[in-house]
Image: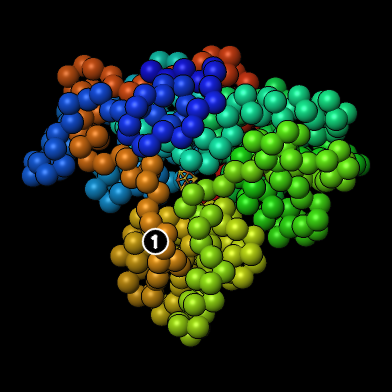
């Protein structure tokens, strides 16, 4: 069981080594996993799922491996999956094939008699880990000391720990996703009022792209808060002049797509369209033809005419699947130097089989339970997102 109430500052663990029960970084898997080479794995997964029937609901994030997606009852982005989990109150067990913060959100949004299971606790998220709760609390104390906290509204990306979502709820902010960030930011800037500011956590790129690209705000209004420096590495004048205080976090996958890769694609594939996720760096997003969440990327490609040429800047498992699903289009991966999201890929068939077979035997392994006080305040921030003007989760 993970307890998200407190998170000590620790250096990143090498994945799968050591024990760090209190962070997104996960732990060694304690289970007696079947070997990945077991030729019976697919059959065992099928048999376990059949034995569990409606008592289990398996969620698969778009970035999961094919071998896992095959057993998902539904697929989607993190928010869609959390909502799908909440819409299945009759399933006592939700097996979440994604990463830790997603399983936390599902636990917050599901009822107390449902249990969310993460097949491998080492499936964390490096972006979520870039904003530890004590760092964020220190930042807020600094903003109070600087005399500006009462003009700051936090906006926190879904890709964050439950503790950061709870911080957001306590301070009158909202959660956002990559598909509703524009609406959330507009709401927050309006709430902050004249001279007000938004503290955007934890992905600086989504914050910058939404402000500059979607809302047309000047880049000079953005400053980056470095949690490893006193006062975030900013002067009182810089803080006072800023509209967007961007947390210094990023996605280890999307942050690696480069301007050079976009230029090479345009040079090598005449007529190509470039579509990227808004977690990419601003200069990459500026060069793209289309920008959007994973759900938007899927819908855009699905709606394009046969023969369209795409290079896609998002997680490789999804891009490979798009290539298989839409063979009438020419779909390529944007960057040869970018690989799979390593933490997403921690969930594999042996872990899924272990989690399912354990349930068949009456054992719940790797339950994700968010501390009730954290869950309460995180829920306030999530509910604020759902109450945004005109907001439904569109894609
Ligand atoms: S793709 Fe990026 S944001 Fe998503 S889980 Fe992996 S590291 Fe985190």
SS of the residue under disc 1: helix
Neighbor class of circle 1 (other Cα within 10 Å; few <14, some 14-19, many 20+) is many
Give the image location of residue 88, x and y in percent: 40, 29
Let me know if residue 390 appears in the view.
no
Q: Nearer the viewer, residue 117 or 325?
A: 117
The image quarter in which residue 134 lies:
top right
User: Could you tell me which residue is drawn at 77 percent across and 57 percent down?
Assistant: 219
Left or right position of 205 against 344? right
The image quarter in which residue 132 lies:
top right
In the orientation shown, which residue stands out farthest toward the bottom? 270
Left or right position of 89 against 285? left
User: Could you tell me which residue is drawn at 71 percent across and 60 percent down?
Assistant: 213
User: Could you tell me which residue is drawn at 50 percent across and 27 percent down?
Assistant: 10
Left or right position of 257 against 320? right
In the orientation shown, which residue stands out farthest toward the left? 39
Give the image location of residue 169, x and y in percent: 67, 25
The image quarter in which residue 352 lies:
top left
Give the image location of residue 146, x and y in percent: 85, 30
Give the image location of residue 289, x and y in percent: 59, 71
Q: Which residue is disc 1 drawn over?
A: 319
Classify 148 as above or below 373.
below
User: Could you tell me which residue is drawn at 74 percent across and 40 percent down?
Assistant: 233
Query: In what quadrant of the picture does the N terminus appear?
Result: top left
């Amino acid at each position: 069981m993970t307890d998200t109430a407190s998170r000590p500052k620790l250096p990143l663990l090498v994945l799968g080594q050591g024990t760090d029960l209190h962070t997104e970084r996960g732990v060694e898997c304690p289970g007696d996993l079947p070997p990945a080479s077991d030729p019976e794995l697919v059959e065992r997964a099928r048999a376990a799922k059949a034995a569990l029937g409606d008592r289990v609901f398996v969620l698969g994030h778009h970035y999961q491996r094919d071998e896992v997606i095959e057993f998902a009852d539904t697929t989607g982005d993190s928010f869609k999956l959390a909502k799908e989990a909440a819409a299945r109150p009759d399933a006592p067990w939700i097996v979440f094939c994604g990463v830790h913060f997603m399983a936390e959100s599902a636990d917050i949004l599901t009822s107390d008699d449902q249990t969310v299971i993460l097949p491998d606790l080492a499936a964390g998220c490096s972006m979520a880990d870039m904003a530890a709760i004590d760092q964020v609390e220190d930042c807020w104390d600094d903003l109070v000391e600087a005399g500006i906290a009462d003009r700051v509204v936090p906006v926190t990306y879904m890709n964050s720990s439950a503790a950061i979502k709870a911080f957001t709820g306590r301070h009158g902010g909202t959660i956002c996703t990559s598909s509703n960030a524009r609406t959330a930011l507009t709401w927050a800037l309006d709430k902050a009022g004249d001279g007000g500011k938004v503290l955007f956590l934890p992905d600086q790129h989504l914050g910058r792209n939404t402000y500059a690209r979607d809302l047309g705000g000047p880049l000079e209004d953005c400053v980056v808060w470095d949690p490893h420096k006193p006062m975030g590495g900013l002067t009182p004048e810089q803080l006072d002049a800023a509209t967007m205080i961007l947390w210094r976090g990023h996605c280890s996958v999307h942050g690696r797509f480069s301007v050079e890769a976009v230029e090479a694609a345009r040079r090598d594939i005449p007529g190509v369209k470039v579509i990227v996720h808004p977690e990419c760096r601003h200069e990459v997003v500026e060069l793209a033809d289309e920008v959007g969440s994973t759900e938007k990327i899927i819908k855009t490609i699905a709606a394009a005419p046969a023969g369209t040429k795409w290079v896609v800047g998002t997680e490789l498992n999804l891009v490979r699947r798009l290539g298989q699903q839409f063979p009438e289009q020419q779909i390529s991966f944007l960057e040869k130097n970018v690989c799979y999201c390593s933490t997403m890929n921690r969930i594999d068939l042996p872990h899924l089989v272990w989690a399912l077979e354990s349930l068949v035997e009456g054992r719940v392994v790797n339950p994700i339970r968010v501390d009730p006080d954290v869950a309460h305040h995180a829920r306030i921030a999530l509910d604020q997102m759902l109450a945004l003007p005109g907001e439904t989760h569109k894609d």
